[in-house]
Image: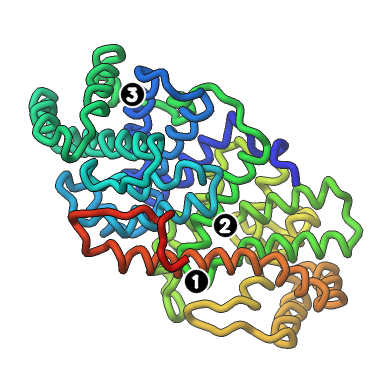
Amino acid sequence: MEAKAVVNSNNISGLIERTLNYVDPRLVDHGKRVASLVYGMLEAQKKYSAKDMQDICILAMLHDIGAYKTEEINRMTQFESEDIWEHSIYGYLFLANLSPLKEWARAVMFHHVAAVHLPDSLEEPIREAAQMISLADRIDIYLQENTDPPNLFVSLEKVRDTKFDSHILDLFYEAERQFSLLACLEEEKDFHKILPNVQLSGKECEEYLRMMIFAIDFRSQHTVTHTITTTRISCCAASHMGLSDAQIHNIFYGALLHDLGKIGIPVEILEYPGKLSSQAMAVMRTHVDLTEKILGGTIDEEITKIALRHHEKLDGSGYPRGLTRDALTIEERIVAVSDIVSALLGTRSYKEAFSKEKTLSILEEQAGEGKIDSDVVAALKANFDTVLEEVEDSCRPILDTYYGLRKEYQYLLGKYLYSSTEAADPADRSHK
């Protein structure tokens, strides 16, 4: 699928910003300020291409993407934090495997490591990016706790050539002299206004879009393949029903985006091992509204509607709008049914995967009650085995990545978590 019709250089940064904002606003606000400081240093240095500067700035914005839990974020926002490895390791692995920033991802691994403990094997550009992000990160955290920049400079000088390379500190001072970085930090800026004006390719935009999907699905082993499963079932059903390529294109992206808002739902609710209370269910249902806010009017209206209407029912019993049959297009109905199939076939914290027979029985029951489209159910029933084969083929590489990432995370965490005096380069893994 071509991404250019859905996301592009002008809207992808806003989509990233709004999505992460629902994890915790502190991550985005902090990330933007760190990116702004890093951009100032890069601009003063005039060493890297505009594309490299853009990549490093996006990396700086995403440097804490490995943190999802409130307690982790609370620890990270302390100036003298010793809890550096969990989110640094996961952030590195996530960006290395699931983003267009593979070339720079190791800088996130080391963004809390003192300069004197950085591995000798680290290439100079990665070392510089790690040090710039580290310095910008600590400056912003310091300024959130203190309002006296002169004392900041005193504090920085105390760790010259230990915590920070001398030339990185001097680079910050030069950027501050040229651009008054600290005075500009509190300005409200859209993230894309921080970035150099470089057009991302359609492939890069697609990769960033998928990165955000995985940022949601990878929060739980039960949801790893939910989005890709829903998307593949939707497209298969549409194809078997004879829909046009244009309709299938919209279905693909509508399904891909349908659960973006779950990034703002607490993991405790997503993973609750039983029936949710009415209060918890009310929170869960807000994920559709959050999706609408994240999409922010930047995505094609037809695709947006497909994403936002996957919990509507033909009889008006769905949410959030209580729409009925006449208001729901065939594309919207297909994704609504496919979302149910994906949930039934997948495991959850409160259930095992349902069998083919039980899944079809539930679908036919809901179709008979007038809740979901009977033609979509019939198409899936007639082609169920073929659809499942396609789903399995689509999910296999995602599962391989997920479990490989978890294994690598545990290895690196076990190796470096308790080491406060030295770091190692994950590229130098001896067991490989």
Residue to which mark 2 is pinned: 259
For the point 28% across and 26% down, the residue is 186
Give the spatial CA distance, label 3 vs label 1.
39 Å
Q: Earlier in the sequence, mark 3 or mark 1?
A: 3
Which element type, helix, strand or loop, lies under badge 2? loop
Tag 3 and tag 1, C-beta contact below 8 Å: no
Label ID, residue 41: 3
For the point 35% across and 39% down, the residue is 127
Between disc 1 and disc 2, the foreground one is 1
Scheme of image coloration: rainbow
- The image shows residue 402 at horizontal and vertical percentages of 53, 66
The image shows residue 238, relative to residue 303, as above or below, that is below
Q: Earlier in the sequence, mark 3 or mark 2?
A: 3
Instruction: Residue lying at the far top in this picture: please name it.
Output: 178
- The image shows residue 193 at horizontal and vertical percentages of 46, 24
Q: Is residue 111 left or right of residue 249?
A: left
Residue to which mark 1 is pinned: 221
Give the spatial CA distance, label 1 vs label 2.
16 Å
